[in-house]
Amino acid sequence: MRSPRPPSDRANSGPRPANPRAAPPGEPVRRGGRGWVGPRSGDRPDAAGKPAAKPFREGPKGEAPRPNAPRPASTRLELPRSGVSGTAAPTGTGGHWLYGVHAVVAAMKNPARRLRRLLVTEEGTAALAAQVAAPWAIGPESVERGRIDRLLGSDAVHQGIALLADPLPSPSLQAVVDRSGPILVLDQVTDPRNVGAILRSAAAFGVAAVVVQDRNAPEETGALAKAASGALEIVPVLRAVNLVRTLVALKAAGFWCVGLDARSKPLIGTEFKQRRVALVLGAEGEGMRRLVRETCDELAALAMSGSMESLNVSAAAAVALYEISRGR
């Protein structure tokens, strides 16, 4: 048991003596190395001992900004943090498997790819050697065809080649805008084979990038890369958190947003001369969502003379891109 503390002499000793280093009454106090601290922290006092008002931040010509003044022109495109993801895609614990000659060759030639393992059969080794000059960036592991079958599943047409690689990073919107060509925006197109086929058409018609919604679009997989036939390494895929905000930002950057809708006037590519187009395609069946549709500058349809009302989304993207290329 602790003994009680002796009574302090300070309790009855009266007021403390003045601290010779203390500031006079009414004056702000300077604390060691942290600036002035007074009634308004961070405000240096004026000659009368009162905290001075905070100055306006000067504009380009030394004038205080007006509340409703237009923003100065900028050469850089900025987006809210919740608008677009411009960071690298998550790599997980071990990447994912790409397969097939075209997809793997394109990945091996892409310096942005991080390669982990390469499994090849005897036939696969010969196919790769015919298209990628030695030495390769990653050492191959010779395996039997059955091992790749068990690894990827019996429905994967791998051609005796499987490459374990990390996903590609998602580019920034500014990097996408700086590239030439139109932009494709996919509103909740979820089938990886459709997205892969769209990427293949995008590469054929010089598309700057394909924009997909972050949460309602397929992840980069072997099936998507196989359908893209190497285009995944050519056309950047930007994963946007909010497509509406992305469209608004593209419009601010000078793009004309055209939504593909079967009930609208025909799409005529020559009408878009001297314009950069952002072509928006919705999911099969449901089409574009309402807010995405309303954000577009105009809606257009594919001119079809047959009895079919619509095409598969990947086929529609190819036809629309061809039509737009006529006006470039």
Image (cartoon, helix red, strand yellow):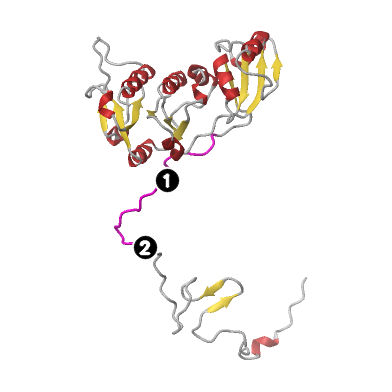
Q: Which mark is residue 90?
A: none
Label 2: how many residues lie within 10 Å, few (<14), some (14-19) or many (20+)?
few
The secondary element bearing badge 1 is classed as: loop
- Residue 208 occupies quadrant: top left
Residue located at (55% from left, 11% from top): 157
User: Residue 32, how many percent across, how many down?
Assistant: 61, 74
The single residue placed furthest to the left in the displayed view is 265
Q: Nearer the viewer, residue 9 or 86?
A: 86
Amino acid type of disc 1? Arg
In this rendering, the answer to whether 263 lies above or below 75 is above
Instruction: Tell me the chief SS of the magenta region.
Output: loop
Look at the image and say whether residue 79 sits in the magenta stretch. yes
Quarter of image, res 279: top left
In the image, the segment drawn in magenta is 64-89
Query: In the image, is residue 74 above or below residue 224?
Result: below
Q: Please give the name of the residue rendered at 49% of the width and 39% of the height, measured from the top-left corner.
A: 86
Residue topped by disc 2 = 61
Q: Which residue is mark 1?
A: 76
Three-letter amino acid code at disc 2? Lys
Q: Position of residue 212 (x, y in %)?
A: 42, 30
Task: Identify the element where label 2 is drawn.
Answer: loop
Q: Position of residue 111 (x, y in %)?
A: 59, 29
**In what quadrant of the picture does the N terminus appear?**
bottom right
The residues bearing labels 2 and 1 have C-alpha atoms spaced at a distance of 21 Å
Q: Residues within 10 Å of mark 1 (few under 14, many from 20)?
A: few
Identify which residue, 67 or 131, lies in the foreground. Answer: 131
**Percent x, y of residue 325:** 34, 23
Which quadrant of the structure image shows residue 284?
top left
